[in-house]
Image (cartoon, grey):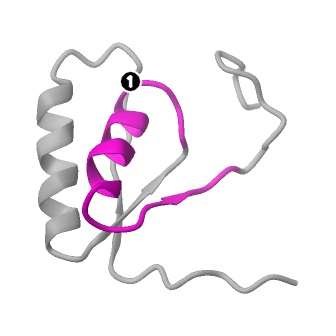
Amino acid sequence: MSEWPELNPSIAIVGSREFQNLEAVRRAAHFFASKGIRVVSGGARGVDQEAEKAAEKIHPTLKLSIKPQMRPGEVFR
């Protein structure tokens, strides 16, 4: 069994693929990462990806996947 990485403090920034204000997402992710707070992402297109990209420039991020075989656009049921 693998060890879980240290998650505290951490935050998930999630939202819609069609969210219009991605600059606000980038700024929020940058803010949290600059304070040493790890951004946790599901890796989905849109808000998740933008938050992850902005944060990883400053602080390591963590991408979690519940169902790794999912394809883009597939709905988890």
The question of residue 15 being in magenta is answered with no
- Residue located 73% across and 50% down the image: 66
The question of residue 46 being in magenta is answered with yes
- Does residue 65 appear to the left or right of 40 in the view shown? right
Write down the quadrant of residue 38 in the picture: bottom left
Q: Residues within 10 Å of mark 1 (few under 14, many from 20)?
A: few
Write down the quadrant of residue 63 in the picture: bottom right
Write down the quadrant of residue 40 in the picture: bottom left
- Does residue 32 appear to the left or right of 11 in the view shown? left
The residue pinned by badge 1 equals 16
**Residue furthest front in the image:** 57
Which residues are drawn in magenta?
A: 43-65
- Does residue 31 appear to the left or right of 57 in the view shown? left
Q: Please determine whether, in this image, residue 16 is positioned above or below residue 2.
A: above
- Relative image position of residue 36 (x, y in whole percent): 23, 77
Q: Amino acid at mark 1?
A: Ser
**Residue furthest right in the image:** 1
Quadrant where the image shows the N terminus:
bottom right
- Relative image position of residue 17 (x, y in whole percent): 41, 19
Quadrant where the image shows the C terminus:
top right
- Relative image position of residue 75 (x, y in whole percent): 70, 22
Q: Please determine whether, in this image, residue 28 is positioned above or below residue 31.
A: above
- Residue located 78% across and 30% down the image: 70
- Relative image position of residue 19 (x, y in whole percent): 28, 19
Q: Secondary structure at mark 1?
A: loop
- Residue located 53% across and 32% down the image: 44
Q: Please determine whether, in this image, residue 67 is positioned above or below residue 64.
A: above
